[in-house]
Amino acid sequence: MKKGLILTAPTIADQMTYAGLADKAGFDSVWVTEFFNQNGFVRLGAVAHATKKVKVGTAIAYAFMRTPMLAASGALDVDEISNGRVILGLGSGTKRMNEDWYSMPFDTPPAPRMRDAIGLVRAAFAAGKGGGLKFESENYTVKIPAYQRSGQVREQIPIYIAGVNKGMVETAARHADGLVGHPVFTRKYITEVVNPALEGSKCALAPYVICSIADDPSVARNEARSQIAFYYTTSLYHSILDIHGWRAVGEQISAAFKKFDFAAMGEAVSDEMVDAIAVCGTAADVKDQIKQWDGLTEQVLLYPPSIGVKSARLRENLSAIVETFAA
């Protein structure tokens, strides 16, 4: 099973450092994230410059907060920097994220819009040799008679999309090269919902797996617990809980979050939930636990928790993950 590393390191310099270490350790891929205070493509360019062989990806960059043409040009630029190592990961974000964080409308169904965004990005890639670009769909219309792209390394770059619920997972199966699995995917959810939707497609599953390594297993488990609670403040993700009968847990976490009761949020996450979602404990524990994803996917994206984690501890965990899973 191939290993990828999500670069949750505190600074861009840190991300470059750990990307370089993962590259030397034989990791298959390293991935940057995007948030309201960090730009995924800028960080991806820095990471690409700091590495030589490892694939570099966005997991994810926001699809609707920028136009697909900007996503395409960003991916092409970094693909040139990295000599053809980019994976473009796109995600819709939630309605609140689009509207409140970026003042962007979120008034059309996200799955068809993502389908059209993928189509436009691929059209931009394919038009690089010249002759212009023309694309028309339900959500996007682009006409650039003079379009071409000098220095383009590849005619196409792999496109992964993030998805949780059935509509976006099916969109990935039909239109994307890969599905970035949400950090709170459980193995049961992958088995019963995700993989059946991907069956027969060429779409690869690349699930986040929350990973915390510490000499004291309780420290690692509590870090994973806090990260899981953070995500379940969003009700959109509660569908994952339904197949376990855990919907009430999600509602409990959401209610605690509204009161800013962070201790109660973490306490709501049971040991059973932690075991179903994350790998955590000593290095030996984690190396053994990750085997539970064998047969579910051919690659995992190891994700160090960051919620409530101090920078020094985050760096310590990243180092431990690289050392533990070095080829």
Image: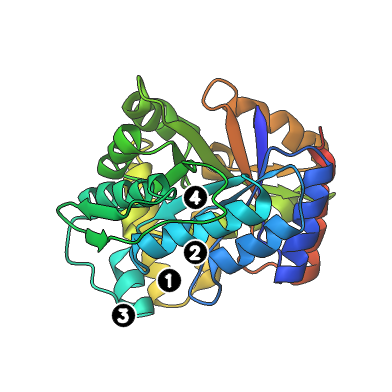
Q: Nearer the viewer, mark 3 or mark 2?
A: 3
Q: Position of residue 251 (x, y in %)?
A: 34, 58
Choose the circle earlier in sequence order: 2 or 1.
1
- Give the residue type at disc 3: Ser
The image quadrant where one finds the C terminus is top right
Few, some or many residues within 10 Å of mark 1 (<14, 14–19, 20+): some
Residues at marks 2 and 1 touching, judged by CB atoms closer than 8 Å = yes
Look at 47% across and 31% down and name the residue there. 204
Choose the circle earlier in sequence order: 1 or 4.
4
- Give the residue type at disc 2: Met
Is label 2 in a helix, a strand or a loop? helix
Is label 1 in a helix, a strand or a loop? helix
Nearer-the-camera pick, 175 or 122: 122
Few, some or many residues within 10 Å of mark 2 (<14, 14–19, 20+): many
- Give the residue type at disc 1: Phe
- Give the residue type at disc 4: Leu
Q: Nearer the viewer, mark 3 or mark 4?
A: 4
- Label 3 sits on residue: 103
Indicate how the structure is coloured in the image: rainbow
- Label 1 sits on residue: 257
- CA separation, marks 3 and 1? 23 Å
Q: In the shown orientation, is residue 254 left or right of residue 26?
A: left
Is label 4 in a helix, a strand or a loop? strand
